[in-house]
Image: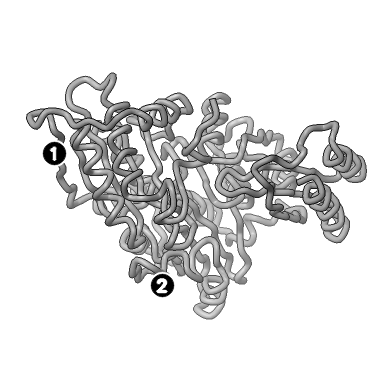
Amino acid sequence: MAKRYFGTDGIRGRVGETPITPDFVLKLGWACGRVFSREWQGKATVLIGKDTRVSGYMFESALEAGLVAAGVDVKLLGPMPTPAIALMTRNQNAAAGIVISASHNPFFDNGIKFFCDQGSKLSDEIELAIEAMIDEEMTTVESAALGKATRIVDAAGRYIEYCKATFPEGRSLRGLKLVIDCAHGATYHIAPQVFTELGAQVDVIGAAPDGFNINDGVGSTATELLQAQVVEKKADVGIAFDGDGDRVLMVDAQGTLVDGDELLYVLAMHRVATGRSDPGVVGTQMSNMGLELALAEQGLQLQRAKVGDRYVKELMHANGWRLGGESSGHIICSDVATTGDGIVAALQVLSAVVASGKSLSELRLGMKSLPQIMINVPTPPSGWGEQSDTPVGAVCREVEAALEGRGRLLLRPSGTEPVVRVMVEGEDESEIKELAERVADAIRCSA
């Protein structure tokens, strides 16, 4: 069955527009409470965390009311990184964790993300069950069965200690100068302490949230300020998180951006060097072909999952591999975290820097990213002629033949907006730009 509300990662949209409205989120909280309680022994508990958007107050209250009406206890964590909610859901023996966040989107968007009791993303079956429950009439349990809400006041401290514990024992970050960009988001009161307490000299930007400035000119989607600061302050590494802290990108000492594919390469090579490597790494359909070629030179496979960290995690689990991620900076190290965790991933990369005695720029040298062109083509609800026997299919076959194994064509409908993403990858940037435009024009004409 097709899902009506859930996208690639929870439910997301513009605040005040369906489904990101207080009345819908109230009903969503109630529906989740009913579903999560079904097979839970005793009274179920659900954790709620959020990023720093001003609308988080409104949706936190709505979720809390819906869950309590369904007879579920609620524990409020306040502003916390998404992976912290995943961790504490497990540690608190909760039935589920909920995060109020639109990740890297601007402040006027918001969303609701979910974790199951094991700290992983919800299955398709549970998401469909929640959607089905939303269609039911909302009722309130008897007063004696209502849930209660409490606040965990030391949540930040617990998560800071967890992050530090993922860094190899006996090592420190002494001697490293870092610039950290918290995107005015959920890591603002967490990340600076983690890296400082591990011994690094830390300069911080993007750590003064006001409810409206999340991801605004800072963070992993706008790294220009961080790149300039790294060069100006003569830092060794820059670290950029997104608004909810599950993504990370890095900057080397020369001010060059290091994306998620390159970070995966650095981590994979460190695991090879330390004898902890699996046969391969999981990426996505969007992972750069340069990563695949660089891993192959070291005898490692790259297997591609659908876009979305939940699908990366599923393929990692199926293969028994411990490393995977996305170009955007969702990095999953499943031997130390259950989900993508920006702070933990950054610490794993810095561990490679410390252990090797090499700079980040040196560690990334073994991978050469191929140029990629991405065009977002708006599409109507009626579709865009994706079948192979349409004019779009004919153009795609011509483009694939022109690439002759030297690159890739990927068409991917967005899970969050009405566009088709046309991605062409290859050795010659001018050639792939022309090929991508051919495909995009064919889609526009078919719409």
Residue 45 visible in rendering? yes
Q: Disc 2 designates what residue? A: 203
Q: x, y percentage for residue 284? A: 63, 40
Find the distance from the CA under tag 1 to the CA under tag 2: 41 Å
Q: Nearer the viewer, residue 402 or 344?
A: 402
Taking the image as shown, residue 403 lies to the left or right of residue 162, namely right
Q: x, y percentage for residue 179? A: 46, 69
Q: x, y percentage for residue 98? A: 33, 42
**Mark 1: amino acid:** Lys
Visual colour scheme: one colour
Q: Disc 1 designates what residue? A: 148
Taking the image as shown, residue 168 lies to the left or right of residue 156, namely right
**Mark 2: amino acid:** Asp
Q: Residue furthest left?
A: 144
Taking the image as shown, residue 415 lies to the left or right of residue 163, namely right
Q: Nearer the viewer, residue 158 or 200?
A: 158
The secondary structure type at the circle numbered 1 is loop
400 w.r.t. 72: above or below: below
